[in-house]
Image: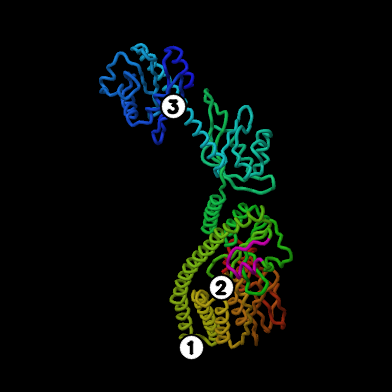
Amino acid sequence: MLREATAMLNRCLEPESVSIIQLGPVDGAQRVVAQAGSISILRRLMESAEFSQVLATVFRYRHPVMFSDLTRSGWRNSPRAVLARSHGRVIICRIDGIGRPYGALTVRARPGTLFGRAEAKLVDGVAALLSVVLGRLERESRVRETLSQYRQLVERGDDVMFLATVRPRLRITYVSPGIELLTGYRPSDFYEKPGLIEKVVHPDDLPAVRADLAQPERLTGRLWIRLMGRDGRLAWVSVSRSPIHDPRGRVIAVQGSIGRAWDQVVEREALRSRAEATTAILQGRRLNGALLMIVRHLRYLLEAEEVLVAADRGRKGALQILCRDGIDRGGPQDGHKIRDGPLARQALRTGRPVVRGDELATIIPWSSDRNGLLIGRGLAGDEGDRGQAAASVDRFAREIATAVESMRLDKERVRKAIGADRSRIARELHDGVVQTLFAAAFRLQLHADEVPKALRTTIQQTTAGIREAINDIQAYVHGLEPSLVTLGGLAASLKQLAVEFESSSGIPVTVELEPNAVAALDGVDTDIVQLVREALSNVRRHARARRVALTIREAAHATVLEVRDDGRGFSPEAAQGLGLRNLRTRAGLLGGQLELHSGPGKGSLVRLVVPEPQQRPESAESLPV
């Protein structure tokens, strides 16, 4: 374009020379970029310092500058005198760029001829036209450079950019090359196969995507979905999208970005699981029901076949399952117990997440003498995906520990409230009912000699019955004190109860308690103590026994409590007393099964079978620690 301009001026004015001088954008160096004719004198003068002053004069004014000649003597006049010239041999005009001068247009007449104002106006018009065109070219160059940088940013960035038309049908019109890293499919695959998008989106997330496309004008926020790669790998992504409207306001396309979102999804699912677990605890559900909320979110996140929470039972090779979600692929096991394989043992030993094949295990940091384990089986993805899952599963282990601690604190609060209420009832019984019975017995005994002899025996029997009732009430008052269970634990409470029974009745009691069986009754210990108290009270009243045995042992899927005596026995079918009804009621509240075995002269056996925590009714609270 510059050469065409110099050639055009050369044809019109027939000068000695025409040239365009460009200034370097950085150092201001001068160089000739287009020429016509002989410019030998110009080239010699461009090497001098005075010529830079000439250009400075030209760039200072927007009008063409006319010199007498292109020699040192030709521009020694003042700038005002140079501008005022009406004739001259040399015309120099400024050529503008964007924000700075591009250079100068120089025309030198042949020897013996001079240029006038008409020639200066023509040269100035050409310079102005070149300024407009150069400015446009420079702007277009900047736009191309910006587009190139933007394209590099789009194609090399972490997020995948996309553009999809929704009318008349869904079609991907652009997707950046980063989609191949996420799915294994190239952008051309999406252009050639419009239905590939439904193959890439996880089947469980397709309804959400279809709902978006059905009403694209309502697109808001972000969409969290899973993408399925060509090799079967899953990737959690966050999709931001916005509609594109036609001139009539209809949505014709959707544009947005797709970014990896594993950490954000982990945080979101962890917060949701915490909220649901907290709600379950506040609703009074058992701990395994609250933990199940967390386990389900983790299984959904990991795409696992099974996720479970287990507790170390303290015996070699045995773990107790507290809750489980998914397909049971645990292999040989005994009810709600599993074998602690190498995976579990390594996690318990190291205290860190462990991955073996498609299985994962990590320790649960709850404060207890029993260790907890979070185990996932049948995890989706490859080794890299499982390593990423292991780094995040600790988040859910902490949520489980928080739920356990919340349940423990809530249970402690309830225990304190129940203890305070029992203390109040005990005081009222002792200070009210017992004192009234004492007074009644005293009055009967005081007037026994004043009644006929036929009634004295009846008064003595009535007085003895009142004293027995007083003893029973005092025993219940003692049992109502919360310190019996809350301070010493179930095992210590039962042993203390046996000592008190032996002291008051004179009947020796043997106590055999398996530690693991006692631990399984944690959470229902108060009911167990009251049930044993009722059973021993029945023995003292009716059995006429010489020995009593109290045992608690483990059985398949349950814990068995037995109170056995060698007394005179009874007929279970005919027994309908209040004491036996109390035993059956307490057993029902625990979700257990009460068995009565006895016969005349054969002693009696009261057996209570209490199911494991997972099988107890919602009214029976249970803690794993």
Q: How far across and how far down the image is residue 207, in percent?
A: 63, 40
N-term mark: 2 or 3: 3
Question: Taking 162 as reference, is 62 above or below it?
Answer: above
- Kind of residue sitting beneath label 1: Asp
Q: Secondary structure at mark 3?
A: strand
The label shown at residue 449 is: 1
Which quadrant would the C terminus be assigned to in this image?
A: bottom right
Measure the alpha-carbon separation of dots 1 and 3. Answer: 147 Å
Does residue 96 appear in the picture of this structure? no
Residue at 61%, 57% in the rendered image: 387
Question: Taking 486 as reference, is 245 above or below it?
Answer: above
Residue behind mark 2: 369
Left or right: residue 448 compared with residue 215: left
Dot 3, how many residues are within 10 Å of its Cα: few (below 14), some (14-19), or many (20+)? some
Measure the alpha-carbon separation of dots 2 and 3. Answer: 89 Å
In front: 281, or 588?
281
Dot 1, how many residues are within 10 Å of its Cα: few (below 14), some (14-19), or many (20+)? few
Question: Taking 337 as reference, is 503 above or below it?
Answer: below
Residue behind mark 3: 32
**Range covered by the magenta-colored residues:** 343-356
Q: How far across and how far down the image is residue 618, in percent?
A: 59, 61
N-term mark: 2 or 1: 2
Circle 1/circle 3 CB separation < 8 Å: no
Magenta span includes 117? no
Give the number of the mark in front: 2 or 1.
Answer: 2
Give the number of the mark in front: 2 or 3.
Answer: 3
Q: Secondary structure at mark 2?
A: loop
- Kind of residue sitting beneath label 3: Val
- Tell me how many marks there are: 3
Which residue is the extreme one toward the right?
A: 332
- Kind of residue sitting beneath label 2: Asp
